[in-house]
Image (cartoon, helix red, strand yellow):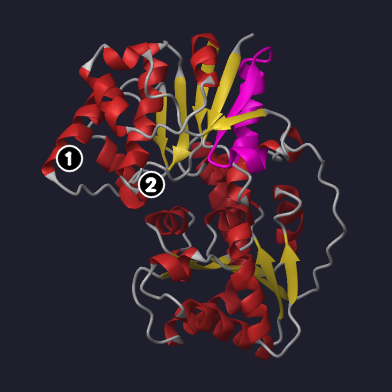
């Protein structure tokens, strides 16, 4: 038996699920006889719901090859050791590794995250397995001390030249990696945005995608929160007040409002937001049915107010504009390439006054029809450019 390993796959949010489905389709076309193995941070939860064998996200760090070079010894000591032994059996029989991690190459979750990432490349090289790194974010990277910097940069110089291609979706990340490799480095916008076709969500889950019909009233706006704004930005708990102010304004000017749960982690704040307003607000939970439900309904909204990255990507795929409250560079870059930066609210800056947010909201309220046309034209041009 031969294998293809898709690393970084997930169904924890709809963006990760979309990337996983695209990677599965790619794998089946390239190696139709190979068995697909999913490497996920949520092994138990994912295995219950999908059609493929799921292994842990981390690869082994104590194989024979780790003891034969300085690179291997560093990774043996520094990379996470929470892995499945099954990898030791399948790596010599693997045709391809596809990485769709999205946002793993950063020290925001600790330096070991990067060592685990590099360990996969090291093992791919040791077993002569081609590895493709599909479009994702890289950085920021910050070192605690000189030793950490020296070890990490040594590994970056040694390993980043090996993948067949490294697709980087932000220019800052591209600039950072270009210090270590150039020939295999490609700037490419988000893989879901660039995918020119209907994403086949039926490739992934066991239980299918039947769901009850969801009615979206005319003149409707979707609110799509992200709890990470509260956890990771100076805005903090004021985020809920900002969203409630937006909802109140939209209702006052005659729009219907729905709250969409795009990720399971956001369920609590979505419920809190719904209860903050006296008007009965429709709540739509897309997490139980996979990406197909969100993909089906999002085109029915006039525009969205969103903080989940791939909720915006999927909206743009259908020409739906967005007022974006973002918390990472990837949001700024997405809106920049789609020529929508005027509707960006950067929550990395403390927002003490809601007036700027409401001003951007009012502008979008006036212009969403013309913005829809501009978004679709821009998307067509981007796909031709990066085809």
Q: Which mark is residue 112?
A: none
Q: Position of residue 15 (x, y in %)?
A: 59, 48
Rendered residue at 65%/14% (across/down): 34
Q: Position of residue 317 (x, y in %)?
A: 63, 51
Q: Which of these two is toward me, 61 or 309? A: 61
Q: Which mark is residue 170?
A: 2
- The picture quadrant where one finds residue 200 is top right
Rendered residue at 19%/33% (across/down): 151
Q: Position of residue 46 (x, y in %)?
A: 65, 40
Taking the magenta stretch, the answer to whether it contains residue 356 is no
* Horizontal side, residue 286 vs residue 331: left or right: right
Rendered residue at 58%/42% (across/down): 42
Q: Position of residue 348 (x, y in %)?
A: 35, 68
Quadrant into which the N terminus falls: top right
* Horizontal side, residue 25 vs residue 246: left or right: right
Rendered residue at 69%/40% (across/down): 199
Q: Which of these two is toward me, 196 or 56? A: 56
* Horizontal side, residue 281 vs residue 68: left or right: right
Q: Are marks 2 and 1 in contact (CB under 8 Å)?
A: no
Q: Which mark is residue 149?
A: 1
Q: Earlier in the sequence, mark 2 or mark 1?
A: 1
The magenta region covers 19-46
């Amino acid at each position: 038996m031969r294998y293809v390993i898709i690393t970084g796959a997930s169904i924890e949010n709809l963006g990760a699920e979309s990337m996983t489905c695209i990677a599965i389709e790619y794998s089946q076309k390239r190696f139709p006889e190979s068995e697909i193995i999913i490497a996920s941070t949520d092994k138990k939860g994912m295995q219950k719901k999908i059609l493929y064998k799921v292994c842990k996200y981390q690869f082994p760090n104590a194989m024979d090859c780790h003891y034969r070079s300085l690179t291997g010894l560093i990774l043996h000591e520094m990379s996470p050791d929470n892995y499945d032994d099954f990898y030791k059996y399948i790596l010599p029989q693997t045709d391809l590794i596809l990485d769709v991690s999205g946002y793993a190459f950063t020290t925001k979750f600790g330096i070991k995250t990067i060592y685990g990432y590099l360990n996969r490349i090291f093992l791919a090289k040791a077993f002569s397995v081609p590895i493709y790194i599909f479009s994702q974010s890289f950085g920021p990277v910050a070192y605690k001390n000189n030793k950490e910097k020296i070890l990490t940069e040594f590994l970056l110089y040694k390993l980043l030249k090996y993948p067949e291609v490294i697709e980087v979706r932000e220019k800052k990340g591209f600039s950072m990696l270009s210090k270590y490799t150039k020939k295999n480095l490609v700037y490419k916008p988000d893989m879901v945005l660039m995918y020119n076709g209907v994403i086949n969500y039926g490739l992934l889950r066991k239980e299918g995608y039947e769901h009850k019909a969801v009615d979206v009233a005319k003149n409707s706006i979707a609110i799509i929160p992200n709890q990470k704004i509260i956890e990771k930005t100076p805005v903090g708990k004021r985020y809920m007040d900002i969203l409630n102010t937006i909802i109140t304004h939209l209702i006052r000017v005659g729009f219907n409002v729905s709250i969409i749960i795009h990720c399971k982690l956001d369920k609590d704040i979505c419920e809190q937001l719904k209860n903050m307003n006296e008007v009965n607000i429709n709540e739509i939970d897309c997490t139980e049915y996979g990406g197909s439900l969100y993909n089906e309904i999002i085109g029915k909204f006039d525009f969205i107010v969103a903080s989940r990255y791939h909720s915006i990507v999927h909206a743009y795929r259908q020409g739906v504009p967005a007022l974006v409250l973002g918390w990472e560079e990837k949001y700024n870059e997405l809106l920049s390439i789609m020529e929508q930066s005027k509707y960006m609210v950067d929550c990395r800056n403390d927002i003490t006054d809601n007036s700027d947010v409401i001003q951007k909201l009012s502008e979008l309220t006036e212009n969403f029809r013309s913005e829809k046309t501009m978004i679709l034209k821009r998307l067509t041009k981007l796909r031709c450019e990066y085809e």
